[in-house]
Image (cartoon, rainbow, N blue to C red):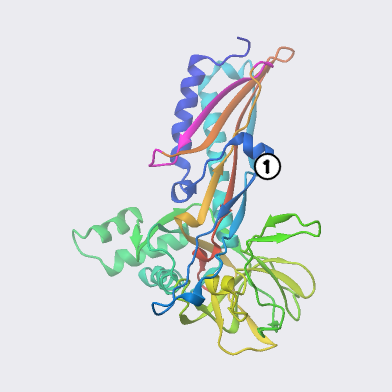
Amino acid sequence: MANAFSKEERVAFEELGEKFEDALVMLANTSVYRTDQTMMARANDTISRPMPYIIPSYDGTDQTNNFNDVVQLTVPAQINISKGSPWVMTAQDLRDALQEKRLGDAAMQRLATDINLAILGVACNQGTVFIKRTGAASGFDDVAAIDTAFNEQGVPQNGRYLALSSRDYNNMASNLAATTRSFGDKISNEALRRAYVGNVASFETFKLDYGIRKAAALGSAITISTLPAGGNVYVPLATSAAATGQASNVDNRFQRVTVNSTTNVAAGDAFTIANVNAVHHITKGDTGQLKTFRVISVDSATTMTISPPLITNQGGSPAERQYQNCVVTATSGTASIVFLNTAPGVMNPFWVKDAIEVLPGRLEMPTDAGLAVERLTVNVPGKTIKGVELVMSKSADINTLKTKYRLDVLFGVVNKQPQMSGIMMFSQL
């Protein structure tokens, strides 16, 4: 067959896949949802994924008046990230197979980094639980603060992960090496010799060699109405109807709110609202702690999209009772917004595994048009679950004796539950 791969190239591709699997650190700690690719092509590569149900309970044996509609919320998930790493080799270059292998390794590493960064970006930019630390990373107390926030809000105990920048991770390791130092102590020895933190306060920790930085928030004197009739009370909806009567699913992760001004507000800023406390997602009990929110986008001089929405149950509808996430302890037409990211720094994301989901896609390339194609679907690292498909293709030009190679991946990432993910920032003023 014209332009067929040699056996040596196939073997090299298999070895490349093994390295690709090892490099997918973030993928190993998220959920993977595989879809029918024909169906996805017909649905504009979009599928609705369900959010967890939350069902209220009531006292007594007589539940006559408590049979209410159940609202199933969904979020749109898309296969919308296509990454390719191309290179070209001349007939002279191909004499040295080692160079070909090195180029393939570099392309694979770049694509694995792209996947990790996509997951990291979704976790950092859409996670809504914000943990502010005024000092440098110091160890147990930092991670315990995340654990406390998750526990108070009823976030599941299993599958909790924390990814730290190298600087913050090593600061934690330094603390463990010093505070637990004793001869023969495994935790202390690992921290000292390998800068290893491991499982702390129910979170499995990971070190990143890259991090996403966030600038300090510059907005000030910004207020928002928390009155029941102030226009910012959110009622979850499963679907909404267009003017034509056609129903479509509603993305209940976000809400557009009205404030007095959005001057100097930027996407990604974290904030609290005066007298708006977080509640336990299941019991609806007031945690006594201010609810944290993130700015998703600034839409106008007085409107911005935030996450999560203000589901305060001020309207008392079944959907509000079911998905209430905060309580207003004292209503106000001018409740103060206080920004939390008060100094620039790296965002260290944390999440529950089921909150973030990766959707592998498939690129169909013709093999009868002079293009040689090899496919390899790697497993999720450490598991037998099939993950992202790595595609290698090549074609040669008889005029120039140059051979073009490329590695490609197609996938999507969705944060199904921003309230089960968040970021921690250190050295905040």
Q: Kindly identify the residue that appears in the image at 58 percent across and 27 percent down.
A: 392
Q: On screen, 277 above or below 394?
A: below
Q: Is residue 53 left or right of residue 300?
A: left
- Relative to residue 53, is residue 145 depicted above or below? below
Comparing 277 with 18, the one in front is 277
Mark 1 = which residue? 43
Asked whether residue 205 is in view, the answer is yes
Residue 212 placed where, x, y %? 58, 58
Q: Which residues are magenta?
A: 368-384
The quarter in which the C terminus is drawn is: bottom right
Give how far across and how far down residue 82 sits, in percent.
64, 40
Foreground pick, 382 / 385: 385
Seen from the viewer's position, the closer of residues 186 and 80 is 80
Q: Is residue 160 left or right of residue 373?
A: left
Question: Residue 46, percent across and down?
Answer: 65, 46
Look at the picture and state if 79 lies above or below 190: above
- The amino acid beneath tag 1 is Ala
